Image (cartoon, grey):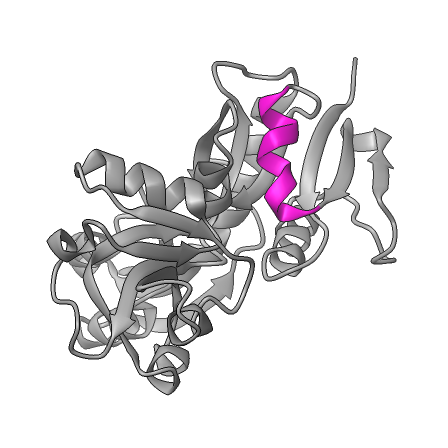
Amino acid sequence: MALLRIAVPNKGSLSQSASEILRESGYRQRDDAKQLTLTDAENGVEFFYLRPRDIALYVGEGTLDVGITGRDLLKDSGAKAEEVRGLGFGRSRFRFAGPRGSFTDLTQLAGTRIATSYVGVVRSFLEERGIEATVIRLDGAVETSIQLGVADVIADVVETGSTLRQAGLETFGETILDSEAVLITRSGSVPEGFEIFRRRVEGVLVARTYVMMDYDIPSDRVADAVRLTPGIESPTVSPLHRAGWSAVRAMVPRDGAQRLMDELFEIGARGILLTDIHACRL
């Protein structure tokens, strides 16, 4: 069987998190940042470490089967590749920004010069809304383009907004794009071996958002407890050696687990334990 060829970011904000999720999924990963390829024959995959901006192009052309890249980079590339699912890391938000007090809504973009590192994303956004403006490609530090007279507006990633404020800029209008790391394949194609790879990755993502909860509860309160911890399919309920008591095990969302422990304690649960889940298959 041919190896599944997977593109992984070689540097930047996505690189470390992408390698971590692959390791947690049971795949070997490189130890040397200069290593360009790695074959994990035991698991039927081969990894190629590439510039994040190039990954969608390689996958779209069918040179590689699967890739991890940013949603922003995928949309900006125009490649024949599609998002399979978000991966929950590398989140960013794209906004328009201009001199403080100069712009209030998107209609004012008509006829302006917009500087950005993501020309494809911005042009598509403007075309969908029938706004005609000149989009100028700049690589990095687009905040200074207005001060230098190159542009009237910028479109860029906004995190805390502190960099914009330092440049005398403020955001306006709706968000252009909410981005995160995504798993991609060639449009209309499901490579051989991909379903196993996807199940492994999804198992890690679920494991990161859930914990295993175990507790003992008086048997006459089991129904109340199960309403609080219904689990994925259904919780496991077993009788204890102590008469009138049962043990319950269920997967619960990590967020809110402490509050859930308080609620269970209030209805009589004792010996409540939380355990991390490293991987799962649902």
Which region shows up in magenta? 51-61
The residue at the point 40 percent across, 58 percent down is 115
Q: Residue furthest front?
A: 149
- Rendered view: 248 above or below 75: below
Residue found at x 41% / y 61%: 214
- Depth order, front residue of 81/214: 81
Q: Which quadrant: the N terminus?
A: top right
| Magenta stretch: includes residue 58 | yes
In terms of depth relative to the viewer, which is nearer, 217 or 67? 67
**Nearer to the camera, 238 or 29:** 29
Instruction: Judge whether 255 appears above or below 50 on screen.
Output: below
Find residue 30 and report its horizontal and vertical position in percent.
83, 51
Residue at the spot x=28%, y=42% of the render? 125
Residue 60, position as x, y percentages in the image: 58, 24
Is residue 233 visible to the viewer in this orientation of the structure? no
Prevailing SS of the magenta stretch? helix
Q: Is residue 67 magenta?
A: no
Image quarter where the C terminus lies is top left
Image point (64%, 60%), residue name = 12
> Where's residue 89, x and y in %?
49, 57
